[in-house]
Image (cartoon, rainbow, N blue to C red):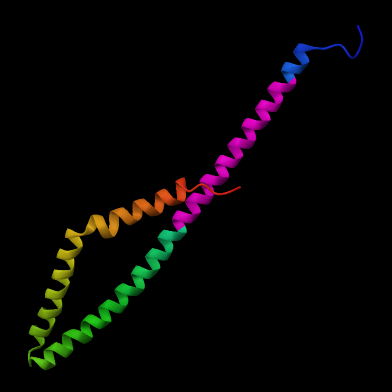
Amino acid sequence: MSSDEYRPAKEISRIFKLFKDFLQIRYDIFKLEITENLVKILSGFYVFFVLVSLITTSALFFSFAAAYYFGEIFDSLPLGFSLVGLFYLFMILIFVLLKNRIITRPIIKFVSKIFFNKKAD
């Protein structure tokens, strides 16, 4: 037998090894893509949390300022705080009525954009 003779078993073994290597590389790429997507989502939530915290703190101080301002205008501190409270009740009502449009849909778009946005290679 010459060394140049065709060996199907050896070729099949080589193809199997290449396929196994290919699957391992695809698995590693998949893990990296999942990690990248999770980091994007977590960083988005972190930025959102920081912004909400800062906005909430600002709103708290502005609410007290507005309540005292309205209290002086109407010469009744309880009325000033009640007006600010009514404003927040109105905001809650708007939020409940529009929650799908202002919360659910943007989150779905954000997450689906991260997971399903194909990058140009």
- Residue 116 falls in which quadrant of the image? top left
**x and y, in percent, of residue 118 in the image:** 51, 47
Please tell me which residue is depicted at 29% across the width and 58% down the height of the picture.
Answer: 103
Relative to 8, say whether 97 is above or below. Answer: below
How would you classify the magenta stretch by its main secondary structure?
Answer: helix
Relative to 92, say whether 38 is above or below. Answer: above
| The magenta stretch spans residue 38 | yes
Is 40 placed left or right of 48 in the picture? right
| The magenta stretch spans residue 82 | no
Is 105 placed left or right of 17 in the picture? left
Please tell me which residue is depicted at 74% across the width and 22% down the height of the picture.
Answer: 14
Residue most toward the front?
A: 120
Please tell me which residue is depicted at 22% across the width and 86% down the height of the picture.
Answer: 65
- What is the magenta range? 14-42
Q: Looking at the picture, tell me which residue is in the foreground, 11 or 118.
A: 118
- Residue 72 falls in which quadrant of the image? bottom left
**x and y, in percent, of residue 107 in the image:** 35, 54
Relative to 14, say whether 6 is above or below. Answer: above
Q: In which quadrant is the N terminus drawn? A: top right
All told, the count of numbered labels is: 0
